Image: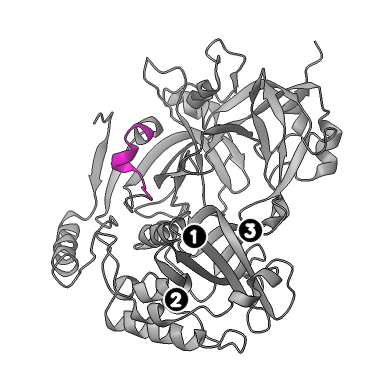
Amino acid sequence: MKFKGIRYFFGFILASMLVGSTIGLTSCGPKEQVCGSNEEYETPITDAFKFNLDDVVSNNNFLTATTGLAISEVKVIAYTDGDTTNFSLVNGTGGENDRFRLRYEGIDTPESTGEIDPWGLKASLFTKTKLKSATSIVVVNDLVQFEKYDSSGGRYMGFVWYKTETSDYRLLNLEIVEQGYSLNYLQQSSALLPGYFEAFKEAGEAAKKANRRVNGEADCDYDDSGEVVETTIANAKENFDTLGVDYNTSSGGKKLRITAIITGVAGYNFYCRDLVKEDTDETFSGIYAFTQYKSIDLKPGYIVKFYCKITKYSGNYQLTDIETSTIASRYAFEYVAKTKEEVEKLGYEYDIDAYKIPDTSITKYSDFEKYTGNYVEIPLTVHGDRNNPDAPYYESTTTSGGQVFTILTYYGDMSLNIRCESHSFFSDAETISIVFEVGKTYSIKAFVGCYQYDEDSEIEYQLSLPSFRDGYQNYIQEVTE
């Protein structure tokens, strides 16, 4: 394994050694049967709890129900974490309106996306594994007793039943509690869903008595050593199997310290790139950073130093678990330079301009890989939606329940669509139609990202627009020649 320029920092060495020794003795001994593994406990409470709603599944619509029992058979669209999954209706029309994000009722698994907590990755993997093995999945909710949406308004609430080739339907929410991946948060009984309250209470008490996982067991794959790896973005990507958060193995990844220059801001989040590159590299290595909606003052050209982790989300590298507090502390977010003069005084080149494409190195679709996470300027030709040839976009629902628009474009004969999130100027159909016209070519300044629908799908590349600080005309211009 090749590591370029990594240094290890150990804070409070003696304290860390003492804590490490204590953890080693208490968390990895015989009592901790699943420490560092994904081994399952027996679940007699879940085994005994039976599904009794077969006769109403096909006669209801989970999404359109307004009161009483909401229930439908669904299939997985995307996995988010241990207590949230994206589904679509099996008996729907197959369109975007059949897709929705569901937050599991009665549980709250540890974080595994914007932040990484102990047991979060294992909870996420457990949910994914169970649903991937399912031959049928049914979601249900009592809209009299429970809320239809979560507090954000963007996610439906519900209980998830699944069955496999070798088992009858099992209540996944309940199983997660009994396995110890979440405490029991079901506080109300339901006349339409009898027995749920009692089963959750019993499962929660059993897991607590046994100290299972979040009830007291240590997650030995979670790195709480205090060790920090100082690295470049390029090195973090190259050595992802050692440094990164891995959802397949439940490795929590290393805490990284990265020094980078900001190349763009996207809502609360940002893009950044390395300050140096290898002589053999064509571009500086860039990446998207997800702050989990934490506000921080950033502008293109700032050099910053911060602590984070690196993960892959739908095939795309991104930084997460970012420490954003600027208050003096061990993990404070630091501003190294804010002006061109300060950057150059440090010996770095102040260059935040977009990479210009067309480029002789772009001859096939996969050539966009080298630009992922980077700011580019590229000519794109707009085409119409297959269902509406005059519309230069299609509309869909985001994983958080909001609306997102995808502007349909080609680079030559290669698809390279533009994804417009809510932070961008193009967050409604009318504005998109005014600026973009089917058949015309535009020079676009945006960031290259990629998307992988699932593990078996091909990588798709797309552009994401930054937050416009000085008008969209500086980022999008019609090509008239």
**Which residue, given by chain and number where applicable, does mark 3 sit on?**
90
Asked if residue 246 is among those painted magenta in the image, a careful observer would answer yes
Q: Position of residue 34 (x, y in %)?
A: 24, 65
Are the residues flagged by discs 2 and 3 in contact, CB closer than 8 Å? no
Q: Nearer the viewer, residue 152 or 337?
A: 152
Q: CA distance from mark 1 to mark 3?
A: 12 Å
Of the two numbered discs 2 and 1 on the same chain, state the one appearing first in sequence.
1
Q: Which residue is mark 2?
A: 174
Magenta extent? 237-247
Magenta run includes residue 316: no
**Mark 2 vs 3, N-terminal side:** 3
Mark 2 and mark 3: Cα distance apart in space:
23 Å
Q: Which residue is mark 1?
A: 135
Quarter of the figure with residue 37: bottom left
x and y percentages locating residue 281 in the rendered image: 41, 18
Disc 1 is placed on an element classified as: loop
Q: Which mark is residue 454?
A: none
Crowdedness of circle 3 by 10 Å Cα count: few (<14), some, many (20+)? some
Q: Residue at x 38, y 57 (%)?
A: 121
**Mark 1 belongs to which amino acid?**
Thr
